Image (cartoon, rainbow, N blue to C red):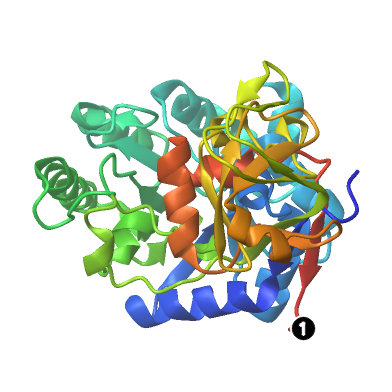
Amino acid sequence: MRFRSRLLVDLNQLANNHQLIQELIPNKEILFMVKADGYGHGMIPIVRFAALELGIKQFGCATLGEALTLREELPDLDTEIYVFSDVQVELKDCTDFYLHRRIIPVLSNFHDLEFILDHKDFRHFPLCLKFNTGMNRLGLDYESSEQVITKILKSGRREIFHLMTHYASSSKSMEEDAQNLLQKSRFENLIKEIQAAGIKITATSTANTGAISQQSGTLDTHLRPGLMMYGPTSLAPELRPQSLWRGKLISQLETYIIKVFPIKKGECIGYGATQVQSDGVIAIIALGYGDGFSTRFMGARLNHQGHEGVVTGRVNMDMAHVHFPMSALKDLKVGDKFIVWGHDPGPFYRLSEETKTLTYELFCQLTSRVPRVHRTSP
């Protein structure tokens, strides 16, 4: 584990982002996505704070293992936990977990739906159905809606607890993109068809981060924010200037400088003996690919004390070289704190674009060697 290289997580900023979502689309329940260890920020402290301080009562995981971790680590929280992808309801151990640990599988194929409806122990279990309206990932086939309705009615049920879909292109315009318009139309048709069959729908959700950023989802009972709760929007770069989202990153990735030395054009550094392209100064920072500071960071621009440096040469497992102009020498000192990203999303987006790495991935790729430090005070 590192000590001075760490991800500082500001829980007060999480609260600020939550408030901004509520202002964008008021009076909606929040189903907060906390999969992949809270998008790399530490799932347990995030959920504890969100439940106790923000009043969020519903959380989304990708796997049953993640859901069980929440139940085991936070047994006293009054929350609903959804499993979105790796549900495996037919396995005996998994069946028991769903029945006895208050965990809801999101049913996205007909086999799992049949299993739940035909299993006598699940006769009073809430039905959460996800339909594929055009993303062609997980989801009950849109064209099979009549078959789904018939199966539900034959089982004696008259209620769907939560009906949802997932947009494939919410990074694009929700009002102009043809795929988004198609998916919205199909979901509205599904609701009408299900209700016409006499089946009550208690809750609906379609809006993920990109859709919420555009105030889409106002007709649903629930919003499903993921990335935006941690700060960034998922909108495409060309749409960000028009975005209504003003959230900030809840995290700051910081490390420190472990060596500083001047270097001349043509001199070599590191593995592969990379030749530097100009005179300058090298600052070696204590982050490498063993920490999730990927080799994709090579060539990325980082700032320190107002000076712009470039990650130069091969990123090592434990460290990386950052090449600054000679004018930065006076402001580069061994032991200095070095911030890779802070709360301002602008440099974070730039890092994502320069490294051709999704913003989600920048968060999630940080390894456990980088401790997560959670704070509520300035």
In front of the other: 261 or 344 = 261
Q: Residue at x 29, y 27 (%)?
A: 136
Q: Quadrant of residue 251?
A: bottom right
Q: Residue at x 76, y 51 (%)?
A: 70
Assess disc 1: are there few (<14), some (14-19) or many (≥20) residues with their C-alpha within 10 Å of its C-alpha. few
- Establish if 243 lies above or below 323: below
Residue 213 image position (x, y, % from top left): 32, 65
In front of the other: 162 or 264 = 264
Q: Which residue is mark 1?
A: 377
Residue 196 image position (x, y, % from top left): 17, 51
Q: Quadrant of residue 270?
A: top right
Q: Evaluate whether residue 225 shows in this view.
A: no
Q: Residue at x 59, y 27 (%)?
A: 266
In front of the other: 364 or 331 = 331
Kind of residue at badge 1: Ser
- Establish if 283 lies above or below 376: above
Q: Residue at x 63, y 60 (%)?
A: 328
Q: Is residue 8 left or right of residue 342?
A: right
Residue 46 image position (x, y, % from top left): 70, 63
Q: Evaluate whether residue 363 shows in this view.
A: yes
SS at mark 1 in the image: loop
The C terminus is located in which quarter? Answer: bottom right
The N terminus is located in which quarter? Answer: top right
Residue 211 image position (x, y, % from top left): 30, 58
In front of the other: 40 or 317 = 317
Q: Is residue 85 left or right of residue 262?
A: left
Q: Is residue 242 left or right of residue 105?
A: left
Kindly give the residue lying farthest to the top in the view shown: 272
